[in-house]
Amino acid sequence: MSASQAAPAVTISIRMVNELLDRLVEHQPLALACIERAGIAPALLEQDSARVTVEQFALFYRTLAVELDDETPGLFSRPLRAGTLKFLCLGMLDAANLRVALHRFCWFFRLVLDDMHFEMGEDEGLTRIALKERAELGRHRRLILELMLMLVQGIASWMIERKLLFARVDLGFPPPPHAGEYINMYAGPARFDRPLTALYIEPAFMDAPIRQDKASLSGFLRKAPRDWMHVSVSERLFTHRVRDLLEAGLGRPQTVEDVARTLHVSPRTLARRLDAEGTHFQAVKDALRRDVAIARISRTDEPIASIGADLGFDDPAAFNRAFKQWTGTPPGSYRRARPSS
């Protein structure tokens, strides 16, 4: 199996691409060229329900960062020049534990950003990393806050070499239309309309030792922000456990009864647990098949009919209908652009 096929099949909404593109109105030709270099078909930008792989978004983001010499491309009034995040991480690597490392993280951004900074504090026995806005972030405020929370999550999880789980994630804005996406964006339950945008961390994580070194830093930065964009927290969310089981048995008929039996619960309990997380069995199954289909169509030259058959669609027309229902476009539209070498 090739590396591209082995990579996790995870997608995100096209809206993150569109919002970043809209943010860079003064650099539209460059941004559109970066979209094509990331293998994202331009036609997908017109489809609100379209999806892109995490790898495609990460490549789009990294290419923008290089071309603009800004590691937060166009997000703030002052750019973060190439090497900023590397310098930040180098200053965190010799910390005694995550608490010290995150303290340095917060102070670093006080030095390099004018528009916002991170503030570390305690709240009811939890460590709080709050995003304090010092300037008007404009109509892309929500996107900026989302990405900055991912930055904390990505760097902290990498530093301790384990997925950092949050007691909760507070968001200082109303639930957006894509609120259902947050279950895969952050490793903790999201709460909207809060007075602060902040991550809340259990004390046990704060004492975790730093397990990375300079030798592993280049690889981490080279993939950024890919590993920050999606979480799979089987020990926390039932939805992810169900998805993991379905993915392990992809290509075989799998019913809700089969999955419930493997998880040692009744189908009714399974349905109740998924409902509590805002989803249901068929939605999890369809999201997985959608993501796998998009990933394989984008990464490989396999016949689309073969991909559909592997996902349980004996009739190519049925697969085309399902794919269009999932994404708003037929599967062929995802092959009109391929990543440049």
Image (cartoon, rainbow, N blue to C red):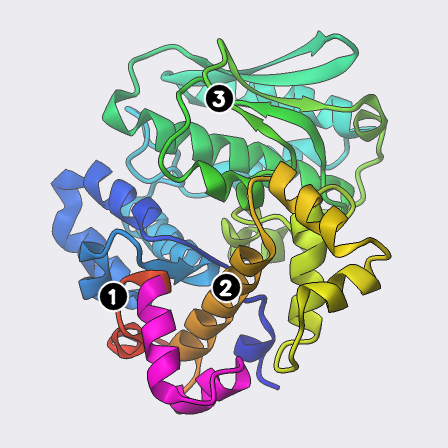
Q: Earlier in the sequence, mark 3 or mark 2?
A: 3
Front label number (1 vs 2): 2
Corner quadrant of residue 259: bottom right
Residue type at the position of mark 2: Asp
**Label 2, residues with CA under 10 Å away: few <14, some 14-19, many ≥20:** some
Tag of residue 36: 1
Q: Is residue 164 magenta?
A: no
- Alpha carbons under labels 3 and 2: distance apart: 26 Å
| Relative side of 308 to 260, left or right | left
| Relative side of 52 to 107, left or right | left
The foreground one among 142 and 25 is 142
> Looking at the picture, does residue 240 appear above or below residue 336?
above
- The residue labelled by disc 3 is 192
- The residue labelled by disc 2 is 286
Residue 339 appears in the picture as rendered: no
SS of the residue under disc 2: helix
At horizontal 81% and vertical 44% (from top left) the residue drawn is 211
Q: Which quadrant, please, contains the N terminus?
A: bottom right
SS of the residue under disc 3: loop
- Alpha carbons under labels 1 and 2: distance apart: 27 Å
At horizontal 66% and vertical 82% (from top left) the residue drawn is 252
SS of the residue under disc 1: helix
